[in-house]
Amino acid sequence: MKAVILSGGSGQRLAPLTNTTTKQLLPVANKPTLFHILDLIKEETPIKSVCVVVSEEYGHKVKEELINSEHSKYFQFDFVFQDQPLGLAHAVQITSMHMNDDPFLMFLGDILINKGDLKKACEQFVKSKPETLVLLKEIEDPRAYGIAEVQNGRVTKLIEKPQDPKSNLCLAGIYFFQPSIFYAIANIKPSYRNELEITDAIDFLIQQGKTVEHYIIKSWWYDIGTPENMLKGNKALLDIISNSINSKINDSVKIKGKVIIEENVTIEDSEVIGPVIIAKNSVIKHCKIGPYVSIGKNIFMENVTIENSIVRDQTKLINPPPSITDSVLGKNVEVRFSKMNPQELNGIRKIKVKYVIGDDTKCISL
């Protein structure tokens, strides 16, 4: 069995974060979503061959990141460039020469799920040998997704973004396919969006009388396509971290809950309320951090109160007067204010602000 991971797409809902990188490389709990997916595939499937479909704009960056990662020691990677966003089925179609008539897992590169579900779905696919197995998730409002209608344990119909859905089972962006999916794709036409829809290809198999099974995800599932969902995924991943402190922490620091503090981190006169991750070579002074904060490498933070946020590498936060919450800050960002006296600061700290700031942005008020 092999895998296809789709790592293209413009990520418009994540702008300005995606103005300088693809959404699959944006870190959640200090690791790109794409790397979380590869960790899961390694742990829960027998797959060692992965074909990554990338865009023309950021494909070379994705390729570089993967080849230089620890994952290249375990997986054999192939890369296919999709020059235009012509649909998920088109992205699968252009990988056909790399699949060699093997069954394969297709995984959208911006999906996060908890451990356990992929393993159970893979075992079902191997045991039952359906033409396709789709992973589904029950959600409150499925209109923004493809949905599946199910009867007697089999998928009977797939509909892309229905306005009046007859089911609350959304397609989770994870599929197991037999090679017959390529024949199905060759027999469908572009949708009204001028895209080859994977739902149409699977529906073709259903109409041909082929068996399409489903697996319903029991735990959490997030489509990391918005800053809000990035933070939900970050929270879910931080909830399952194990405590690990690899820097010397002085007596002026209060730590509550589970934290990961990497090497060469300096923390002074601060409070850290887990779950929190602080990556290596970061400096934290006079701060209150957490819960649910992921801090990247080489960060400098002074006089900051922050919760439920993601701060990427090489960012500086100095004296922001309001508390920061529900925020995602890009790489090499600087937010700097002049220092306020304690009386002024106490009142303003009760105010909470949300930031979504792209890479290399400076916000300075002195």
Image (cartoon, grey):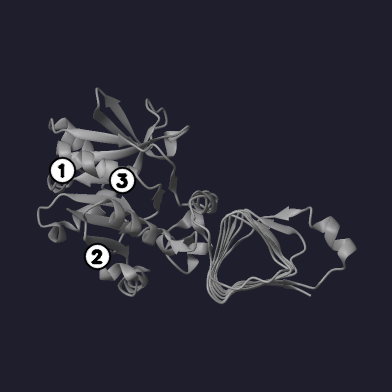
Q: Quadrant of the C terminus?
A: bottom right
Q: CA distance from mark 2 to mark 3?
A: 18 Å
Write down the residue under mark 3.
118
The image shows residue 294, relative to residue 63, as above or below, that is above
Question: Which kind of residue does numbered mark 1 sit on?
Answer: Ala
Question: Which kind of residue does numbered mark 2 sit on?
Answer: Phe
Write down the residue under mark 2.
75
In the rendering, at what x and y percent does residue 58 appear? Answer: 37, 69
Crowding around mark 1 (Cα neighbors within 10 Å: few <14, some 14 to 19, many 20+) is some
Dot 2 or dot 3, earlier in sequence: 2
Q: Which picture quadrant has residue 128?
A: top left
The total of numbered circles placed on residues is: 3
| Mark 1 element type | helix
Question: Which kind of residue does numbered mark 3 sit on?
Answer: Leu
Q: CA distance from mark 2 to mark 1?
A: 28 Å
In this rendering, position of residue 56 left or right of residue 127? right
Q: Which picture quadrant has residue 55?
A: bottom left
Direction left: furthest residue: 101
Residue drawn at x 40%, y 47% as measured from the top left: 113
In the rendering, at what x and y percent does residue 174 appear? Answer: 31, 46
Write down the residue under mark 1.
184
Direction right: furthest residue: 343
Asked if residue 197 can be seen in this view, the reply is no
| Mark 3 element type | helix
Residue drawn at x 54%, y 54% as measured from the top left: 227
In the rendering, at what x and y percent does residue 11 appear? Answer: 44, 57
The foreground one among 101 and 278 is 278
The foreground one among 148 and 317 is 317
Dot 3 or dot 1, earlier in sequence: 3
